[in-house]
Amino acid sequence: MLQDKFGRRFHYLRLSITDVCNFSCEYCLPDGYQCDTDRDFLSLIEIKRIASAFAKLGTSKIRITGGEPSLRKDLPEAIRACANTPGIKQVAITTNGYKLPDHIDSWVEAGLTQMNVSIDSLDPRMFASITGHDKLDVILRGIDRAIELGVTVKVNAVLMRHFNQHELSSFLQWIKTTSITLRFIELMQTGDNQLFFNKNHASGLPIKEQLISEGWQQIIRDKTAGPAQEFSHPDFKGRIGLIMPYSKDFCASCNRLRISALGKLHLCLFSEQGLDIREYITDDDTQRLQEELTTLLGDKKSTHFLHDGYTGATKHLAMLGG
Ligand code: SAM
Ligand code: SF4
């Protein structure tokens, strides 16, 4: 099992397969996806080799992300490649949900077990103004189908002072009867969004306090569970999660490594350029990759430096997958 000098163990890989996106979320790609050069994204064979190499190093869960991963036509094959890899027990995706109703059946058939969908507002007009697309009803329909198919669904909502901060009660109403985990994510600063961040960052702590005062109980999670805090309530089918990257000890439970769509391994969402692993996955021999990773993990810092406004090379999270 891959481990760093702080005793953190890395059994979870976030694998980006494209940085292209069709949405223009205010905090991520407000002007839409821009790129004027050709991009050589990981091929299916490279995805297979990465899954197999990381499984041999103790990875049991792979999340496919982007950009928007569903824009790749071979997404079902990518899911299948991960799901068929011995040692990989869970295959998840993170998606904006745009293609859900038409494609969720094929993703599940390929081996998808878990899905995170981003919905920052349950008000269709607000949703459209945040993302640039009037697609909330389509996405909600797709989520219903995913639940029917037995997929574990989490919904991510980025907290933004001037957009959705007043929407807690409508989200709560939704999860009264819907068995999803709704996770509020504190807005993070990236290289490109400083002004937006300064205007809109809001702490998740007031939500935590409100939940506790209304009888929600914090769930004691497994040591390997990662940095989200989760809450349940006997009157609600769904759960609430809080992801507060600016809170103390957030990085202590880090359990994930990231690979960009261009094949760079990142130890942190906010690290510098990353290690190009393509040269280590030209065949099925994982020895060199294992040695490189072990050396690299010796350098993993105990925490990010977001509190000091340091965002590394990450211009926006579409580059690496969030
Ligand atoms: N396109 C997919 C989606 O939106 O779900 C996957 C990629 S997106 C970069 C992954 C997650 O990162 C989404 O839930 C998104 O809301 C979140 N995200 C993007 N930029 C963020 C930021 N600056 N702060 C916090 N979360 C962010
Ligand atoms: Fe696209 Fe996801 Fe970024 Fe929104 S958050 S612009 S859907 S990559």
Image (cartoon, grey):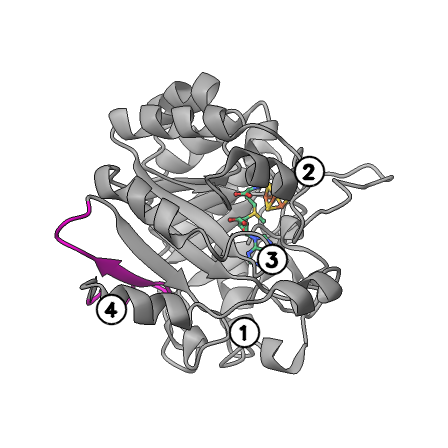
Tell which circle, 4 or 1, labels the residue nearer the N-terminal end. 4
258 up-or-down from 137: above or below: below
Tell which circle, 3 or 1, labels the residue nearer the N-terminal end. 3
Tell which circle, 2 or 4, labels the residue nearer the N-terminal end. 2
Q: Nearer the viewer, residue 170 or 304?
A: 170
Q: Which mark is residue 20?
A: 2
- Please tell me whether mark 4 or mark 3 is closer to you in this view: 3
Question: At label 3, which amino acid type do we have?
Answer: His
Mark 4 near mark 3, Cβ–Cβ under 8 Å? no
Task: Indicate the secondary structure of the residue bearing disc 1.
Answer: helix
Mark 1 surroundings within 10 Å by alpha-carbon count, few (fewer than 14), some (14 through 19), many (20 or more): few
Calculate the distance from the C-alpha at mark 2 to the C-alpha at mark 3: 27 Å
Mark 2 near mark 3, Cβ–Cβ under 8 Å? no
Whether the residue under disc 4 has CB within 8 Å of ligand 1? no
Q: Position of residue 286 (x, y in %)?
A: 48, 53
Q: Position of residue 212 (x, y in %)?
A: 24, 68
Q: Which mark is residue 187?
A: none
- In the image: residue 61, left or right of residue 69: left
Residue occupied by mark 3: 162
- Please tell me whether mark 2 or mark 4 is closer to you in this view: 4
Task: Indicate the secondary structure of the residue bearing disc 2.
Answer: loop
Residue occupied by mark 1: 295
Mark 3 surroundings within 10 Å by alpha-carbon count, few (fewer than 14), some (14 through 19), many (20 or more): few
- Please tell me whether mark 2 or mark 1 is closer to you in this view: 2
Q: Quadrant of residue 299?
A: bottom right
